[in-house]
Amino acid sequence: MDIPPQVSDILFNPVLMTFFVLFLLTAYVMYSTMFALIGSICNTDKETQGFIFPITMSLMLPIFVLMYIVQHPDSTVTRVMSFIPPLTPTMMIARLNISVPDSFSLANPIVLDATIGVLATMAFSLGLIWLSARVFRMGILMTGKRATLPEIMKWIRYK
C-alpha cells in the first residue's frame, strides 16, 4: 500500500487503537444503560421522545464543536468538555487523533487526559448501571402509569 507516512502513523498507532477500543466499549455500556433506563420509565414512543433528547444532544454536541476541537485541542474549554462523561468518548477520540501520541507515557498530557477520561466514563457507567437498576425494578412494574420526576426519585430511594 502506498500510504503517506503521516497517515500511516495515525492508522497503525497502538495508543490510538487501544483508546479507541476502550472508549468504544465504555460508550456502548454507558449509552445502552441510558436507553435501558428510559425504556424502563416510559410506556409509549411519545413518552420516550422527551427523555431521548438529552441523550441525543450529548451525542451531537461533540460533532457541533468538532471544528473548535481541531483548532484548539488543548484549550481549557475542550479539556473541560472532554471530562464530561457523556461527551468524553467522542471528544477524546477527536483530541487523540489531532495530538497523535506515540507512546503510553502518562507524562504526555493527552494520554493522561485520555486515561482519566476512560476511568471517569467507567465510573459514570457503573453509577448509571446502579441508578438504572434501582429505577428498573420499580418502573417495569408501573406499566400504564406515566412516570413523573418526583415518582422516579421515590423509586431510586425505595429500599
Image (cartoon, grey):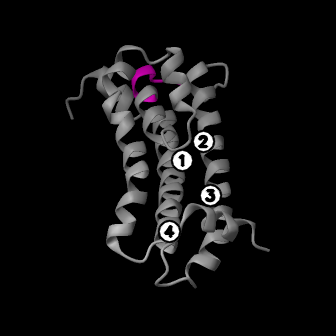
Circles 2 and 1: CB atoms closer than 8 Å? yes
CA gap, disc 2 to disc 1?
A: 7 Å
Bin the neighbour count of mark 1 within 10 Å (Cα to Cα): few under 14, some 14-19, many 20 and up: some
* Amino acid under disc 1: Leu
User: Distance between the Cα atoms at labels 2 and 4?
Assistant: 21 Å
* Amino acid at the residue labelled 4: Ala
**Which residue does the numbered mark 3 point to in the structure image?**
128
**Which residue is labeled 2 in the image?**
118
Q: Residue at x 67, y 49 (%)?
A: 123
For residue 63, side relative to residue 99 (left or right):
left
Q: Amino acid at mark 2?
A: Val
Please name the residue shown 56% across and 42% down the image.
Answer: 85
Q: Nearer the viewer, residue 93 or 59?
A: 59
Callout 4 crowding tier (Cα within 10 Å): few <14, some 14–19, many ≥20 = some
- According to the picture, the residue beneath numbered tag 1 turns out to be 22
Nearest to the eye among marks 1 and 4: give it: 4
Q: Which residue is mark 4?
A: 36
Q: Nearer the viewer, mark 3 or mark 2?
A: 3
As drawn, the residue found furthest toward the left would be 2
Point out the frontmost of discs 1 and 3. Answer: 3
Q: Earlier in the sequence, mark 2 or mark 1?
A: 1
Instruction: Tell which tag, 2 or 4, sits nearer the viewer.
Output: 4
**Residue 70 appears in which quarter of the rendering?**
top left
Residue 125 higher or lower than 90, as above or below: below
